[in-house]
Amino acid sequence: MRFQHPGCDVHYELEGPADGLPVLMIHGFGCQLEIMRGCMEPAVAAAKANERLLRVYVDLPGHGRSAKADLTLASSDALAACLLALMEHVAPGRPFAVAGQSFGGYLALGLAAKHPDKVIGLQLLCPLTTPDLEGRSVEKLELIRHDDAFLASLADADRESFLQLAVRADRQTWQRFAAEEAPGFAVANPAFMDAVDEHLPLSPSVDDALAEQPFEKPTLILCGRQDAMVGYRDQLRLIQHLPRCTFAILDISGHNLQFEQPELFTSLTADWITRLLN
């Protein structure tokens, strides 16, 4: 489906009944909606909520099938406004929950912090919370579990791309990476992403907005103990402003936690969905 927004023809896909509780799914930087569909659909099924949630999967402007986007949208504030307009188009006047991965988690936080009247739940997967790259507390990348024979079977370029953030590297995690994450890298708009990098901080800041008005709806934050991209320490500071938050730091998990600990991801996210619906 397409949503006409000034500066971009936005691609999105729907799962579930039109009258279900809307949940906006936001992928990370350089990815596309498959990375969210691949992890969230099993969790929805585990929560037995297929017929209770309207899942809204979107390719952000500059990404995936929305790659042709005007640079006027190349900021976190503009992207958040675009997402809000999309949800008004899909589910006019209705409150919605938000799930976001990495940069998508930062946008999700921004929506929840700025629009607590509209957002009724928040799930964050390895979320970016500190836009300043130099100011982030991240972990040293450590490849803990690996199948050397399988890795040797990959083409050099594939193996190099896969191992950039991997903590667990085997056939199973490679298949998820190749199907759900790598395709986005091939089609993302590099000029757009560079421009977003230059206009990354949300205004007002998430910290300031949450300090003024805590988000008191069901929340889940999942972080990788070995995440070399966004870490887990910066995210801990949010707890004081999220009184309904479950926070988990998973071992043998990096920035692709959902590939590396799929059972725990599914179980914890299913619990969040249950809390959201009850």
Image (cartoon, rainbow, N blue to C red):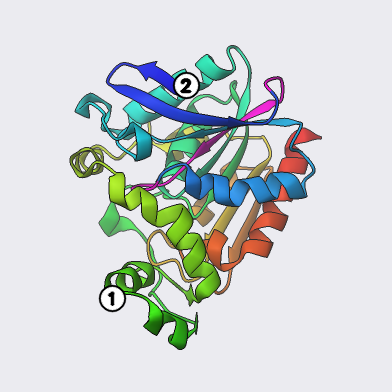
The amino acid type, in three-letter code, at marker 2 is Leu
The answer to whether residue 256 shows anywhere in this view is no
Q: Quadrant of the C terminus?
A: top right
The amino acid type, in three-letter code, at marker 1 is Asp
Numbered label attached to residue 156: 1
Q: Is residue 263 above or below residue 211?
A: below
Q: Is residue 201 above or below residue 263?
A: above
Residue found at x 38% / y 35%: 60
Q: Is residue 101 above or below residue 91?
A: below
Tag 1 secondary structure = helix
Which corner quadrant of the image does residue 153 belong to? bottom left
Magenta-colored stretch includes residue 182? no
**Label 1 to label 2, Cα distance in Å?**
40 Å
Q: Is residue 68 left or right of residue 90?
A: left
| Residue closest to the eye, 190 or 82 | 190
Query: Dot 2: within a 10 Å radius of its alpha carbon, few (fewer than 14), some, or many (20 or more) residues?
Result: many
For the record, the magenta segment spans 18-31
Residue found at x 44% / y 66%: 227
Query: Dot 1: within a 10 Å radius of its alpha carbon, few (fewer than 14), some, or many (20 or more) residues?
Result: few
Residue at the disc numbered 2: 86
Magenta-colored stretch includes residue 29? yes
**Can you give x and y, in whole percent of width and height, for residue 200 in the image?**
29, 40
Tag 2 secondary structure = helix
| Residue closest to the eye, 47 or 151 | 151
